Image: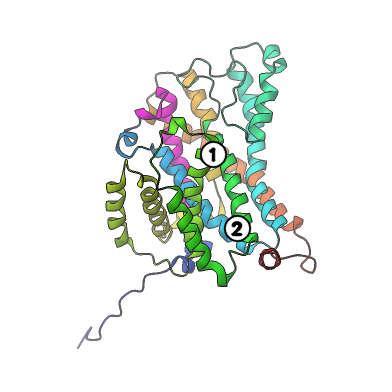
Amino acid sequence: MLNSAPRTPAIAPRLGQIMAPEHNSFGVLRLLMALLVLISHSYLYAFGTDQAEPLTALTGHSLGEHAVQGFFILSGILVAQSFDRSRSLIDFAAARMLRIFPGLVVCVLLTALVLGPVVSLLPLAEYFTGAELPAYLIKTLSLSTGNAPLPGVFTGLPVAGSVNTSLWTLKYEVLCYAGLAAAGLAGLFKPRFRLIAAGLLAAYLAAVFSTEPKPAETYSFTDNARYFSLYFGTGMLAYLIRDQLVIRGGLLLPLFAIFAAALGTRFGELATALLLGYAIVWSASLSFGPLRGFCNRVDLSFGVYIYAGPIQQALLDVAPALHPLIIAVLAAAVVLPLALLSWIFIEHPALRLRSRMRPAKVNAVPARRMASVLA
């Protein structure tokens, strides 16, 4: 009799089983998050406020804010894995710096020295001799702010003087890297301490984010650092429990119910991190066809993220009446090729330098051995 044998139910994968790039779609999700930020910022730049975006009224966060939350969750997972695989603290730090600064430096220089003079309302001599130009370079490249102005640039637009809004999050990303490295050096990534570390991290996140919410416009530097640490910490937590974290799409429904019930309460951010974190892990288990392989070979996400703002503002400078969705389409058409060039000529070659900077194996101090010494 055909098909008489009982079927074995499919076993749900765990996060630890899909951490290899060929088994996950984290690259696809990074690109998606970058494009969502681009779409969201089209509304911000066109109307001068993120309150114009429809999602803000529903969840309290714009589409771009949710995408950045997703970015930090992804970073928490992947950077934790990077530390776990690093041969030394120097190796880890080099990998992080090489991922951010070469592409950022080129973007900032192109923005300040090529785009800025073209769109500035000031004469070239005044543009290049004023104090704002070097201040922009110093403040932006030091990550102290992403909101430094360029002389006479975009001053008449709804978000007046904003050159590259997205860059303000980078300093918090680097702070999260430092916190992760400190936890790793304390031994919390060692297999025998991993679940203890996960419990401590979960308790910290729950304790810190169970207080009454504050309006985002009143956030201080400390508030922002705490906010981003929730989402980065959620990714770290997922990595720490990767061998126990079962991936089932059906769990998204109860998590969404918790999220909807918690909106506007003191537990809203926690519920958002929980839902978004699990949605990212589940989405990463999907194949996305050929796009997975492409995004594993070519990472356009950082280039899209850092180039979108100046291009969107330049489009509005030329055509102020553009609809946000038109801005998004036109900006993507320019930014994606720029991101590809950045990856091919700047970011990927910089990442390849990491292998040259690694010490010889005989002299290397593995991160885990360092942790055992310093714990």
Relative to residue 251, is residue 66 depicted above or below? Answer: above
- Which residue, given by chain and number where applicable, does mark 1 sit on? 222
- The part of the image, by quadrant, that contains residue 105 is top right
Q: Residue furthest left?
A: 1
Q: Which residues are magenta?
A: 25-52
Residue that appears at 32% across and 61% down:
249
- Judge whether residue 117 is colored magenta: no
Q: Position of residue 354 (x, y in %)?
A: 71, 54
Kindly identify which numbered label has been placed on residue 183: 2
Q: Does residue 263 show up?
A: yes
- The part of the image, by quadrant, that contains residue 112 is top right
Relative to residue 292, is residue 99 depicted above or below? Answer: above
Q: Main secondary structure of the magenta part?
A: helix
Disc 1 and disc 2: Cα gap in Å? 19 Å
Q: Amino acid at mark 1?
A: Thr
Residue that appears at 47% across and 49% down:
231
Sooner in the amino-acid sequence: mark 1 or mark 2: 2
